[in-house]
Image: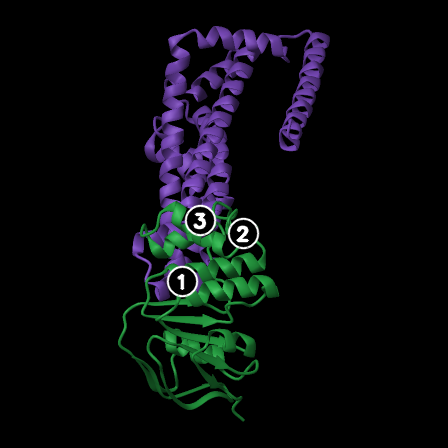
Amino acid sequence: MLKAVKITKSFGENMVLNNFTREFAEGKVTAVLGRSGCGKSTLLNVLMGLVKPDSGEVIFDGERISAVFQEERLCENLTVSANIRLVTGKRFTKEHIAAELAEVGLAECADKAVRTLSGGMKRRTALVRALLAEYDALFLDEPFKGLDETTKRTVMAYCHRKSAGKTVVLVTHDKDECAALADEVIELEAED
Amino acid sequence: MSSRAKAALKKILITSVSMLFWLIVWQIAAVKLNSKILLVSPVDVVKQLYVLVATGDFWQSVGFSAARILFGFALGLTCGCLLAFAAGKLRFVRTLISPLISVMKSIPVASFTILALIWIGSKDLSVLVSFMICVPIVYSNMLEGIDALDPKLREMSEVFGIPVWRRFVGVYLSQLLPYFRSASRLAIGLCWKSGAAAEVIGIPDGSIGEKLFEAKVYLETADLFAWTLTVILLSWLCEKAFTALMALLQRRVERM
């Protein structure tokens, strides 16, 4: 179970979340939709335990989480497959990782250092890393940011396939992404 | 031939031509001066080095100095890293160490060597001097690297629950290795320079410094140049070997 109970969070004078309560459906994709600055990423960070709420609590009965953060948070000096192995350990063979990368159009990138990749390539690497990790809940913060339409469709299909049956919280401002991936949608509005 | 190979070949060619140019200038200057005390020719230096290399005494001196200078370097690397880690973690350690590192950076090698000579005698002087040269370089570089560590990667490691050893290698070592690499590359050359200089001042028996000192006393300029060339070659070899080792380590870390 993943549940946010009466979460309130302010940054100085700016109240971002006010008494937010919601249970996230187990084994389903819940999209958190809203405009920039409405508190989507803050909510995700609170759920992941990266930001402490001013009040309220998060109830999570799982153990492991996985995420695509707002930034890629990849180790720039490691290769793409090393970044994935950093999280997965030796659960996957080199060939398996290469095959997964090929599914998102990174077939040639497995042995390239992350610092040499474009923004879109780094985003896809971060997504593959998150999807290959062992997790009970997956948190995705704008995971398709910076991808062109064709690549985005391919990557969304991959994400949908790999996360099937898992508890996923997807933060986005894109209604098309919601329509394609989400089982449930929460619309957040900026607090006044 | 690939463009990279062509560029490498061009670089080698340019370096060789410029080296040859200066060797010719040196040869001409030596012939014109015609004094084996003031300046010996490069040919004479190579001849003298050839004579020296054939003696057991040469290798004993090389072994004596290399062992001590490299030991000082290794100790300096270890202490520099440990101090940088401590200073990166604890603010009071950083404050405490800061003036000591400033003094180590600015104190003239000759002054310190004389003081060290009084403290520990001449035999292991080059160990201490190499160590003193190495520590501030490694400390400053590593601390810069530690300060530049991305805190968001630490957060990422915690979210994914990455085990400690994997986290150390993948997250921290991968970020710190470039700093360690440039520090050690700079330090190893300076350790050789200062270690040899310290031996000239302390004159430990059977060291390269002793041979340099004797060359000065007996005005054996060919010997002086041959031993100097030996120090340059040893320093260059050590730097190349260490750089290759670092590159290998970096490749291993990159691929995990």
In the image, what residue type sits under mark 3? Ala
What is the x, y in percent for residue B60?
37, 15
Give the mark nearer the N terminus: 2 vs 3.
Answer: 3
Disc 2 vs disc 3: Cβ atoms closer than 8 Å? Answer: no
Q: Residues within 10 Å of mark 3 (few under 14, many from 20)?
A: some
What is the x, y in percent for residue B154?
40, 62
Pointer 1 chain:
A
Q: CA distance from mark 2 to mark 3?
A: 18 Å
The chain assigned the colour purple in the figure is: B
Can the viewer see residue B10? yes
Instruction: Residue under label 3, please give it.
Output: A98
Q: Colour of chain A?
A: green
Way the structure is coloured: by chain
Position of A66 with respect to B21 (left or right) is: left
Q: CA distance from mark 2 to mark 1?
A: 21 Å
Instruction: Residue under label 1, please give it.
Output: A131
Residues B193 and B237: in front is B237
Where disc 1 sits, the SS reads: helix
Q: Quadrant of residue B39?
A: top right
Where disc 2 sits, the SS reads: helix
Q: Is residue A123 above or below residue A172?
A: above
Instruction: Residue under label 2, please give it.
Output: A115
Give the mark nearer the N terminus: 2 vs 1.
Answer: 2
Residues B131 and B11: in front is B11
Residues B256 and B194: in front is B256
